Amino acid sequence: MQAVGKVMKVFITRRIPPEAMKILSAAGACEVSQWDSDEPVPRTELLKGVQGAHGLLCLLSEKIDVEVLDAAGPNLKVISTLSVGFDHMALDEIKKRGIRVGYTPDVLTDATAELTVALLLATARRLPEGVEEVKNGGWSSWKPLWLCGYGLSGSTVGVIGLGRIGMAIARRLMPFGVKRLLYSGRTAKAHAAEVNGEFVPLDTLVSESDFIVVSCALTPETQGLCDKSFFSKMKNTAVFVNSSRGAVVNQEDLYQALASGQIAAAGLDVTTPEPLPTNHPLLTLKNCVVLPHIGSATYSTRGVMSALAARNLLGGLQGTDMPSELTF
């Protein structure tokens, strides 16, 4: 436990970047206790740690439900999550109790967009397979069709969800010589003009795209959106990439689509559950690249995220503006 001052009690559910701890120390407005580990806080420790807390700084891995809110008690004024997503929190209950919520959008847009492009290229050009062949002695003489993949030049890319991150991905893909950029979502977006984006029905996007990138939010409408019917409409030369939320994809249906050659390949930075069990069927496929949810994993991005989470926490504790407050 790290005491900073005897004013308001704050519980932090994980070891986080030093930028955040410096901000909280400098403020001198709170007594900080922390689950000081890189591993998630056990449920029992979370329930113990939040007791009497005025502020909670948590991660996506913590389920902030009625049990946690009850354990915290009436002092709890603010929950600051070190994430863009907030589907781990019981927002209706939090709102009912008048607790403010901070989150960290925008700051990880660039890092996530870069990682998504890297994942798309690695999947389409079969980079993990290539590395493996070099290591296991599979690299022999040059063969015209060996390890051939798919290129972006002259292709049609479909982006499902052209929000901040979707737009940042589209901007990065255009210089590769993409011919058409299709996007779908609830409404047409004015900013799509910047990348010559065509607003189309989802079915059109799925059937005409050579690369499909999912970057929508997880909502009741998008849960399980990418299912058997979805994959059956894709070209069998198409590459599917998801860096949004694992639950947008029906993984059993994706496995069947990949194993049967219904689609060419898939790259995932998000899965259900996380971590994905090492014996999961998707991990047996050569045409599926799975990363451990590292979209925002650059040192600078994680530092900026944690600093924003700390400022959100302080704003909520002091009853002042929070730099990034969730309105719900």
Image (cartoon, rainbow, N blue to C red):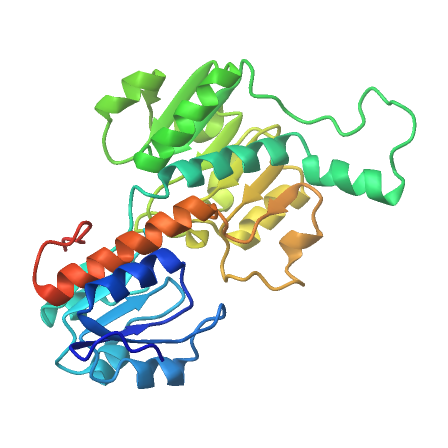
- From the viewer's perspective, is 181 left or right of 234? left
Q: In this view, does 226 lie above or below 168?
A: below
Q: Is residue 306 above or below residue 260?
A: below
Give me the residue at 36% from left, 36% from top. Answer: 165
Give me the residue at 49% from left, 68% from top. Answer: 38
Rendered location of residue 299, percent (x, y): 46, 48
Q: In front: 247, or 127?
A: 127
Rendered location of residue 271, percent (x, y): 50, 54
Rendered location of residue 15, percent (x, y): 42, 67
- From the viewer's perspective, is 307 left or right of 133? left
The quarter in which the N terminus is drawn is bottom left
Q: Is residue 178 above or below residue 212?
A: above
Q: Is residue 307 visible?
A: yes
Give me the residue at 54% from left, 46% from top. Answer: 268
Q: In front: 320, or 29?
A: 29
Q: Is residue 218 visible?
A: no
The quarter in which the C terminus is drawn is bottom left
Q: In which quarter of the image is residue 82?
A: bottom left
